[in-house]
Image (tube, rainbow, N blue to C red):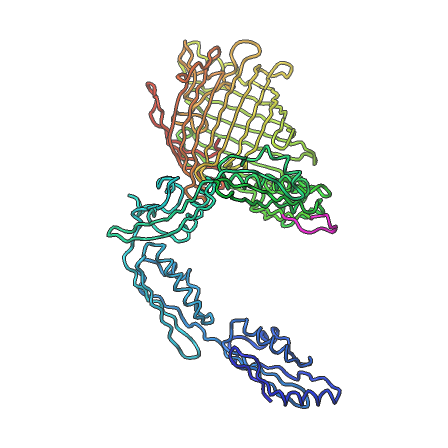
Amino acid sequence: MRWLRGKGRGLAVPVLCLCFFLLFSLAEGSPLLVHSVTFSGNRRVSSERLRKLVWTRKGVEFSLEKVREDVKKLFSTGYFRDVKVDVQYSEEGVDVTFLLEEKPVVLRVVVTGNDEVKTEEIEKVLTIKENDYFSSEKVKESEEKLRELYENNGFFDVKIRTKVIEREGNRREVRFSITEGEKRKIEKIVFRGNNYFTDDELKDRIQTSEKGFFSFITGSGTFKKDVFENDLKILEVLYLDNGFLDVKVEGPFFRKTEEGLILEVKVHEGIQYRVGDISLQGDGAGEAEKLREKFSLKKYMVFSREKMVRDILMMTRKLQDEGFADATVIPRYQRRRGEPVADITYIVEKGKKYRFGLVNVHGNTKTLDKVIRRNLEVEEGALYTATGLEESRKNLLRLGYFKDVKVTTSKGKEEDELDVNVEVEEAPTGSISGGFGFSSVDKFFGVVNLSENNLFGRGWKLNLNSQFGSRRVIFDLGFTDPAFLDSDFTLRLNAYNTDVEYDEFTRKAKGGRVGFSYPLSKYVSTGLSLRIDQVKIQDVQTDVENSVLLEEALKGAQITHSITWDITRDTRNSFINPTEGSRQSFSVEYAGGILGGESDFVKYFIEDRTYVPVLGSSTYGFRFLWGHTVSTVGGRVPLFERFFLGGPYTIRGFEARSITPVDRNTGEEIGGNKELVVNNELIIPLYEEIGLKWVFFFDAGNTWRQGDYPRNLGDLRYGAGFGIRWYSPMGPLRFEWGFNLDPKEGEPKRVVEFTIGTSF
């Protein structure tokens, strides 16, 4: 006996025979069992794989309903064009055979006629692929994708002819024959119906642009469908932010010209609305009412979607920080009849109040749990706070130990608990690098750097920096423990040995520093450090009588004992390559006196570094530094504690140490006891993937001798220029061309610098 399923139809059953057989089975008192299940016609898909999909199998009670469901499952795989069922009855039970007709397979996909668009680009957009099951829908979809690709490359006259050829073995060959036509670019963008904004104002907002002089480089004038669709949304948001609640922006509408294309966009502005009454409803209205004074969008103002969203986020965050994790704020606005006024109602719902349950840390294959947990702003058992979750993620990313950090919540053991799940992906934190090059200051030099920012997974930092060349040998070893003995204190150790040859003398120094710092708040810390070093000035090149440099050299090795107190506020988003935030610091160093040593002075610094995102992914950086040092026993401050400016880390466009007071009697460069440095930088990504960036800068500053002070802007020296900066594994590499904006006699007009080291 057979039950057959036609294409798209139900099972056709000889009902009388089936009923007779079923009645006979029931009369015998035994169920109708499946004796065997087989598949026929399947060539590409194994029977074992199909057997796992169907309910009907050997030994189960036969069910007509289940067979129908099995047929649907087999169809849903997309492998088959038709499915039939053959059922045979015997004393042993029911033998079920699924008769399958597989869909054709794509033998190959052939594209011809593409001269201007690469085959690789075409293959990426085609959804019909070789060895896939053939689908007419995918062929049509591929043709549309192909047409869109060509239009996005400026070929609006493209013609695509699709042909499907049957081959042996139930296979199909799909051919796309392309006639590309002439490439066209947008010569002009025209807006219709815009009264509130001018055409130029609207053009400035969108990415789609008119053809420019350098369009062959920049790609300007090329129409891209996905970009333009986003442009329409941008324009609608612009109007919504200026009170036009009924705005509609439509396009694209093209007109072909001999030169290219005219792109027309139609704007239906509607009327501009102002805000009427603002009311709050829901069980969270009371808490939200306390924030009313902080609302960005207020009565009588021109309606703004951006301000409304800002207020919604503020109210939501306020409730979430009070434990209401599911808090929602739904805006509704009602236009008044006959008036350009919209009343706004915020429906504020608190939801359930939660506490944090377990805090789970995953993915840390190197970093110890305690290192991660001490940087979290959430605690087990504490009230739920959305800000705490967000700040926890920022804190962990700021460390530089992880490629990615995800902080999510899930249902806890108790009804009012949410567990916190911290998922981290470890990043390489150690590096060993070396290199060599040429510097205008040091001539030929070599560099070897060894650093580890997460030593043993404990968050310890260890770095060994060495530079060696014809005029410079430097060794600097540093160690930092940000949680000394698992406390809030940070321990810093540093030892160094330097031998630097300047034009007039050689300076040798060796010493070390030990210090502790302590956080006063999340962004503010204070610290104390002790310094002991020995400095010697030698090999003075001078024939001048009463030489200041010779006087310093005759003192021999001078030992300095000092103590420094500092206070710092740091909100930068990265310690290595910041793009936003700022760092302010003030420090005072006292040397000599009861500390001993041969140097007696007080030195203080005030510094600000600010980073602001501008122009998309670009960054504006600003630095202000004021330094002042005075002797505590009268007379001059030691030469090696004075200020010399110029060079890549202070005022660019000037040679290193060239901005300095000159001794009135000997003409020697003696350094100042006051310094002012102002740096302005615009950093623009060139190849962001490898950390290569453009930098444009404007610097100002000077040094002043003891008794002199800056009086006006004319006292400053100015430099400007540009460069390329590469954040390489061995540190920032800097190639910079600086120009002296007011060169004096004997000063070069331009200084080219190549350096390895930290930028400001």
Q: Position of residue 46 (x, y in %)?
A: 56, 76
User: Is residue 501 within the magenta segment?
Assistant: no
Which quadrant would residue 20 be assigned to in this image?
A: bottom right
Numbered label tally: 0
In the image, taking residue 281 as reference, residue 584 lies left or right, namely left
Q: Residue at x 53, y 42 (%)?
A: 431
User: Is residue 417 within the magenta segment?
Assistant: yes
In the image, taking residue 759 as reference, residue 407 lies left or right, namely right
Observer-nearest of 29 and 289? 289
Q: Position of residue 128 (x, y in %)?
A: 43, 67
| Residue 664 visible here | yes
Observer-nearest of 579 and 602? 579
Q: Residue at x 45, y 32 (%)?
A: 469
Q: Position of residue 713 (x, y in %)?
A: 41, 18
Q: Which residue in the rendered view is the most extreme toward the left?
A: 258
Q: Quadrant of the N terminus?
A: bottom right
Observer-nearest of 698 and 391? 391
| Residue 368 visible here | no
Check the image and report above or below for 583 versus 182.
above
Check the image and report above or below for 439 versus 225.
above
Stretch in magenta: 408-418
Q: Position of residue 460 (x, y in %)?
A: 62, 38
Q: Which residue in the rendered view is the most extreme toward the front?
A: 338
